[in-house]
Structure formats: C-alpha cells, structure tokens
Amino acid sequence: MKIIGKWMGIALLVLPTLFATNIMAQDSKKPTLEDLLPGGETYRFAENLYGVQWWGDTCIKPGIDSLLAINPKTGKEVLLVTREKINRALEQEKLGKLRHLSQVSLPWADKMQILISLPGTYAVYDWEADKIISQRDFPKESANKDYHIASGNVAYTIKNNLFVNGTAVTSEPDGIVCGQSVHRNEFGISKGTYWSPKGDLLAFYRMDESMVTQYPLVDITARVGELNNVRYPMAGMTSHKVTIGIYNPETQKTIYLNAGDPTDRYFTNISWAPDAKSLYLIELNRDQNHAELWQYNAETGERICCCYEEEHPKYVEPQHPIIFLPWDNGKFIYQSQRDGYNHLYLFDIDVKSDVYKKNTTVGSTCTERTWMKQLTSGNWLVQDVLGFDEKKKEIIFTATKESPLQSNLYKVNVNNGKITPLDNGKGVHRGTLSATGSYLIDTWSSPEVPRSINLMSTQNGKSINLLTAKDPFEGFTMPSIEVGTIKAADGVTDLYYRLVKPADFDPAKKYPAIIYVYGGPHAQMVTGGWQNSARGWDIYMAGKGYIMFTLDNRGSENRGLEFENVTFRNLGIEEGKDQVKGAEFLKSLPYVDANRIGVHGWSFGGHMTTALMLRYPEIFKVGVAGGPVIDWSYYEIMYGERYMDTPQSNPEGYKNGNLKNLAGNLKGHLLLIHDDHDDTCVPQHTLSFIKACVDARTYPDLFIYPGHKHNVMGRDRVHLHEKITRYFEDNLSRKAR
C-alpha cells in the first residue's frame, strides 16, 4: 500500500505532524450539514470568479457592477463598462435590468459588443456606441435555446417542436420530439441543434418515440394525483427512431439525411465541415459494437462516404464529434479508445487510401478509408480537446498523462507529434483557450488548494494569478484525508481509495466505517482535486466519529477501456468483488471495528449498496441505497444494453444482476430511498424489491422523496443526508443494538 496524498484543515497544517490534531482544534467547531451541502443555509464553498472568459486574447473578468479587461501578458486591469451603463441602454429598449454581469458574454473578438441573455430576448449591446444594436426575441416558454454568434439566428423548442427566429420548423404530434437531445443523452449527446459555421444552416434531431412504452409517474401535489407519462425504452424492448434534418432559415426548407431505416440505430456526434457542404456523424448499431463515421451531402442529404469504422466484441462508445483543423479544411481530429485509451487520431478526408483493416491489442477492429496517423498514445487518456494554436499548429487538450487521479493541460504539435505539458503538473485542471490559442484560463485545485485561477501562456508557461481561494472551512475542526492503492480482486490491478479519518482520530480506538460507493462507468470518486473529491457528507460523518472510505473499482472512469469493460454482461459482479477487497483492507486496519462496516451509494451506487448487503451480509451490516437499479431489465436501452446486452441475449447476466433474486439474503439493516418522479431509474426498481423482500420475509426500510427526479436537490438535500445519517447512527454507531 502506498500513500500518495494527504490533506488536513489549514488550521492544522502548522503542526509538525498530521496526527497531532487536538492541540489547536479544541476551540474550533465541526462543520454541519448546513455548512457542507448545497442547499444548506450556511453552505460554504471555495471562492470563485464567475463568468471569466476570453474576448479574443483579452481576459474578461465580470463582477457585480463592472466588466474588467485583463492583459494576459502583464495582468493589468482596465474597466470596459459598468452595469449601470448597460442597464440604462436596456431600459431605453424596455428590456429590464441586469442584477450582475457574470452571465454576459463577449463572443466577438473584433467587436466592442456584449451578448446579453434575457427572458424572451437575446440583446447585443455595443459599449462604444452605448446602445442596444440588435435583439432577437423568442417566446418566454422556449427551451433548448441555441443562438448563433455569427448570424444572430436563434433556434429553440416549444414543447416537442423546433422553431428558428419565430418560424416553426416542425409541426409534429405528441410522441415525436424535434430539436432536443436524443438517445437519452448517451454517446456524448447533450443537445439537439447544430448550427453550421456561418449559421445559415441548422442540423437537428427528430426523434419518433411514439412506439416506445410509456411509463407512469404520479404527481401527488394535485388533490387527486395526476398521471405523468414518460417514454421509457427498457432493455430489450422497442426503441425510438431518430432522423436528422437540415433546415435553411433563408428558404425555410428542410431536408432529411438519407441514412436508411433508423430502426435500432443510433446517430451521434454531429459536426459540420468548415465549408458547410458536408455533415458528419457517427452511426452505431443497437448492439453498440460497430461504429461508422459517415459524411453526408448537406444539400441533398445523400451519403458521400464512410470514412472510418470501428468494431469491438464488447462495445464501442463514441463520445466526441470530429474537429477540423482550423488551418486545413481537409483534416480533422477523431477520438477513439481503439488502442485501449482515448487518444487523438488525425484524418485527411482528401487523401483516399485502400481499405485498411487493423486488429488492435484490445480486441478492436478498425477499418480506415482515408489517410490517418495517431497523434497521442500511451497508457493514459485524452479527456477533452480545448482548441488549437493555429500559428504553431498545436492542439491543446486535457489528459491523465501525469496520473489517473489528475487532469492536466498539454499541447501536441500536429506536424511532429511532440507533447508539451502546460501546467504545474499538480491536481485537476480545466482550461479555457483564447481565440488564437496563445493563452489559457487555467482553473485548478489540488488536495491542499481549493481553487486557483490563472492566466497562462501556452508558449512559455508564464502565468498570472487571478484568484487563489482560501480554505472555506478555515477555523473548523476538519478530518484528515488519505489516498492510496490496493489490489483489485484480480490480484493485479491497482485501485485508488480515499480514507477520511476524524480530526480527533485515536489509533487506539475502534471506529465504525462506512464505504461510499458509486462504482459505475463514467464516474471517478477519488481524484487529485480539492480534498481528493471527498463529499460534504463524508466530512460530516468523519466529524461524527466514522471512518469514511471510497474505492474506485474496476468499471469506473479514467483508467482505460479494459479497466472499464471487465464488467461487460455482468454489471455489479466484478465491481462488488473489488469493493469487498476494500472492506477487507478496512478490516485489516487496527482502528476499524470489523463488525461495524456500512455502505451507502446512489443510482449505480444504490445498486452496489444493495448488492453488497445481499451478496456479502457477513461484511456489510448497514446500508442506505438511493435510487438503486435493482433489475437491469427495468433500465433504459442505450446504457443498459451497452454494458449488459439484451435480456434475450444475456439471460444469465440479467438473472445474476437481478437483486430481487437475492432478497432473502438480507440480514443487516437496509434503507432504500427513491424519488417518486425518478425518470432515470424508475420507482419500479425499489418497489419491486420491497415486494420481493415481503415474499422472502426479509425487512428493509423505505423512504420516498416526493417531487424529485433522480436525486434530491435544493433545500431537501440537507434533509436527505440527515435521514441517511440518522439511519447509520441508529444502526451502526456504538449506540446501535
């Protein structure tokens, strides 16, 4: 076991040893749930600069009453305009007032203009002319608004139909949705409209879900409960059908891509060619094991060519649209896990090649039809492409190259493949690139640094600090946090854990321990960021005398394809074995009471919590499962079938993952919490499990949060965590029977 990080409250750092916590902490206080949770009356969080952005290569720092321009070379600040001045111009047009300036934007690098989003209006204010120079109105009930900077066109939806500049693009009946995100937000999809570079064409999704089974949710706020149906395609059942339209605002005509029968197919990662003559997208079969990158004629909707194919016996999961090089309209960047980790590949659409098939070491089969070269490689992954330095022919990106716990900034030269680190090599970074790619707004944190915001040159690495946040819990008694590794159940793979100990930790005592678990794909619980990503509830429970433990098992994020897909067709099984290794590690610690180990998690973590309580009742004594998946056949198609295939093709896997079959194994105390309007993990999961427990004569507990969806947000979030805390206090603490 290797300890690779440790954090304690700033008030304790002056001590010569991390364990001598009582000397200065005696007069300080422990944070409460109100201090630690969003929605709490005294919620404390790291200071931030909201709305910091680029205006070309000039940094803009909005405040309550002023917009400041910062020279990234010198750090010198200049006042651009005041809120008072902007509000006078808004009032002249009867557009209301702004309370602050943190949500305005300056998207035009060569213009002294501000884009202001108001209820029912996008307004453009010119601070040199001191007036509103244009506005684009839309109904206040609009959703999914998409304003195009160059053209001033705005797309939006009203209910299930799409509009552009006040004109109805579609007129579909209930059951057909246009201009919104499709495929239940999988495959990197987060919206439903895509403007061409000049904003003269709009690609959009049209989703026919009229054939999808409706799932009944009940609104109890009405005197007589009202039925709210949602279209919910469960694994193995009929899915929706998606097509892609292209609308021309000038002619008000729409064409649809001729992609063939959309049944049991997914269309994702839409992107425009720079000349807008072509539209690119990735097509995926329902089995999600064969992806194709297709080019379409944007005028006729006809296919032009298939540029690239990728297959894998488990699954292929495209997450990123292609990105064309700004200095070469024929070359684009494609991201793929074909070699085991997500990396960057450079394609040249203008250079055709013989069809070339390649089998990779991780089981992928790739078919290339154009010239291609790999730009990044290694046992680390690219997380995000931030943009380009056109002059230097460089791509700026974030990656886990330094450590799986970190996210750092790099650049790679397209011509020679040289990779250069850009940041300080610590913690978790996210960057916003300036117009030319010469500068970054680098926002980062580490276990000891809550937040630091800096202007950084991508050429020489020099930086100017805009903010270094203080510890928001300075003066409080805070726990210690350790990070280390243990071996997975395979005996080979290193897994990262986080251990949170009470501030007054006494190694001679025996403490109850709680494992907080998620465990599913696309999530990482332990990072090199602030407090190693410890949750507010973890801090709170450590303050109440618990050892808090979290382990990122195989199947979780940022460790590569084989680390993730080891769980294929058997979700919850290998993950559970790894969590047991974590419990065994806890039991080996002399200060952990091996008879008082609990577990808590939400969503996939709710599944894990319930599964661990049922499969390993001799280890886990108390569990709280929030929004749990109980039966994978009740879960939605896109996510569920990627990792489990269908119930028809994988009956054994679905049987093994169905926790209703294990209801008779319950021995400890298990509380299930579910939201009555959960349209992600529908209430049927929890209710059917309760029925199975009744049949098996076992006795879980149940709590419902009315009016919430797949999590409990706002003020009720404090109530949720107080409820969870009381359950562990009643059943796992020294006071428990």
Image (cartoon, helix red, strand yellow):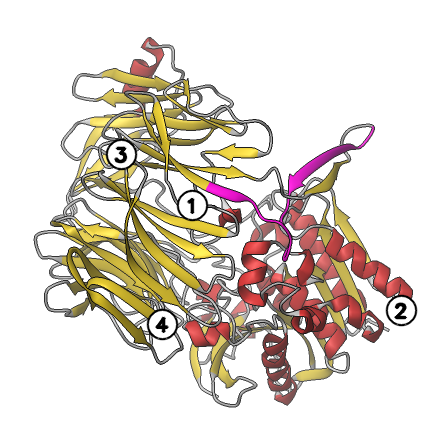
Q: CA distance from mark 1 to mark 3?
A: 17 Å
Which residue was labeled with disc 3? Answer: 299
Q: How many numbered discs? A: 4
Q: CA distance from mark 2 to mark 4?
A: 47 Å
Q: CA distance from mark 4 to mark 1?
A: 24 Å
Q: CA distance from mark 4 to mark 3?
A: 32 Å
Establish if 113 lies above or below 236.
Answer: above
User: Nearer the N terminus, badge 4 or badge 1?
Assistant: 1
Mark 2 crowdedness (10 Å alpha carbons): few <14, some 14-19, many ≥20: some
Residue 35 horizontal/vertical position (percent): 57, 52
Establish if 550 lies above or below 625.
Answer: below
Say which element carries label 4.
Answer: strand
Instruction: Give the residue drawn at x 74%, y 68%.
Output: 659
Quarter occupied by the C terminus: bottom right
Stretch of the chain drawn in magenta: 224-242
Going by the numbered disc 4, the residue's amino acid type is Thr
Q: Nearer the viewer, residue 126 or 688?
A: 688
> In this rendering, does residue 192 appear at all?
no
Question: Nearer the observer, disc 4 or disc 1?
Answer: 1
- Marks 4 and 1 in Cβ contact (< 8 Å): no
Which residue was labeled with disc 4? Answer: 365
Question: Nearer the observer, disc 2 or disc 4?
Answer: 4
Q: Which mark is residue 176?
A: none
Which residue was labeled with disc 2? Answer: 696
Going by the numbered disc 2, the residue's amino acid type is Ala
User: Nearer the N terminus, badge 3 or badge 2?
Assistant: 3
